[in-house]
Image (cartoon, helix red, strand yellow):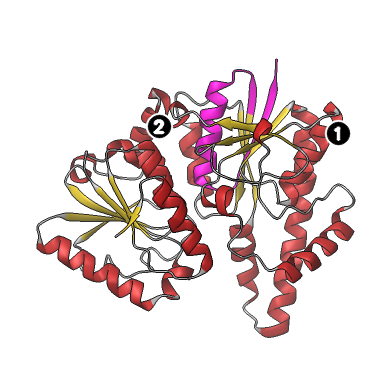
Amino acid sequence: MTARLFIASTPMIALACAGAALAHPGRSRLLLIEDFDLAGRLQDLLEGWRDNPFEAIMRLPGRHTEHVMGARDGGSGVRHFLHRLRVKRALRRQTLTEIEKIDASLRPDEVWLGNDRKPETQLALHRASQRARQPVGRYLDDGLYSYLGDVRQRPLVRRIDAFVKRLGYGRWWQRADHAGTTSWIREAWLVFIDEETPYPPHLRRALPRHWYDGRPICRLGLQAARAFGLDRRALSKVGLVLVLPHSNQLRANHGLLQRLRDRVRDECGRGRQVAVKYHPREIDPDPAGLLRDGTVRALPTLLPLELILPLLPPGVALLGEGSTALLAARWLRPDLAVADLGFSQDGYAARARELFARHGIHRE
């Protein structure tokens, strides 16, 4: 019986892992890395799911954990930096030790993930591939990163980081400028398989839509709606859904914030209800200040948009700013009117708009 280890550091990839595990019978375990808030609630949701394909769901510290523990020092300057560094190193030692234990216990034949650049995922890939004497990694489409690469490309910093990590982790660590391109990857499962990407054609596999919209996933969406108090009847009256990037981008664009507020005011003036879906890694419940007057409905930030999409009525407009969520909505619900605010003007945003245009997402 094939044993598979699934590793997810975002809600979207966790859902992709669930769909892949359902489609591939065998022994499956899911490892959630706490790079986002409320990972524990996502674990509870999946464990209570009647179609849960995982024999175990585990959780390990990640970036969110580092942020919370690093902030407890209360200091500033060099002292605070050193404290955060100590926290990061301690948690990393813990996670790598746990990865080794999981590998020894499960002995996975395949490792499925959406990010093969993290030390935790690389160690899992290395150990399983070394045992199999061949690459065992299965890369799952991670949205914009899969097609455009990393928005934070800083060549000099990346080279220094690679040198330090090679010293710290050993020869097994690999530098990868593009997710899914380490030598451990045997298959790359992509939504837009014909896009020009660094993945060799012989490794590309078409990501099936039914992994996301089959009955088991729909049942998970209904369960999630109940668990997070999402009123389906109220949602059926929504005419516009704002799907927003992380507030780091919002705060850097004051014009974008004003444009969002103007759009909300216009929609409400026409009698259309508006809902907002903030980024899963948000800590502030209302970073854009759109919920203050009670006219805008908040959608649970933890839930992947893929779970909410089946609950939206036909013809709803989705509006966002250069996000992976827009791609997912266009792919899974072609009947919805998906548009991009197109506010950002940097090179990455321009490349994103070109990608969106090729797949029917146009600038508003």
- Please provide percent x and percent y for residue 53: 54, 24
User: What segment carries the magenta color?
Assistant: 1-28
- Please provide percent x and percent y for residue 35: 59, 54
* Residue 145 appearing in the image: yes
Helix, strand or loop at disc 1?
A: helix
* Tag 2 and tag 1, C-beta contact below 8 Å: no
Which residue is pictured at 72% across the width and 73% down the height?
Answer: 83
Binning the other alpha carbons within 10 Å of mark 1 as few (below 14), some (14 to 19) or many (20 upward) gives few
Q: Which image quadrant: the C terminus?
A: bottom left
Which residue is pictured at 18% across the width and 62% down the height?
Answer: 295
Residue type (three-letter) at the residue carrying disc 1: Gln
**Which quadrant holds residue 152?**
bottom right
Q: CA distance from mark 2 to mark 1?
A: 36 Å
Q: Residue furthest bottom?
A: 77
Frontmost residue, 137 versus 191: 191
* Residue 237 tag number: none
Q: Is residue 132 magenta?
A: no
Relative horizontal placement of residue 349, taking residue 107 as reference (left or right)? left
Frontmost residue, 69 versus 305: 305
Helix, strand or loop at disc 2?
A: helix
- Please provide percent x and percent y for residue 96: 78, 48
- Mark 2 sits on what residue? 220
Q: Is residue 213 above or below residue 364?
A: above
- Mark 1 sits on what residue? 130
* Residue 303 appearing in the image: no
The tally of labels here is 2
Which residue is pictured at 42% across the width and 29% down the height?
Answer: 217
Q: Is residue 24 magenta?
A: yes
Residue type (three-letter) at the residue carrying disc 2: Leu
Which residue is pictured at 62% across the width and 71% down the height?
Answer: 72
- The mark that comes first in sequence, 2 or 1, is 1
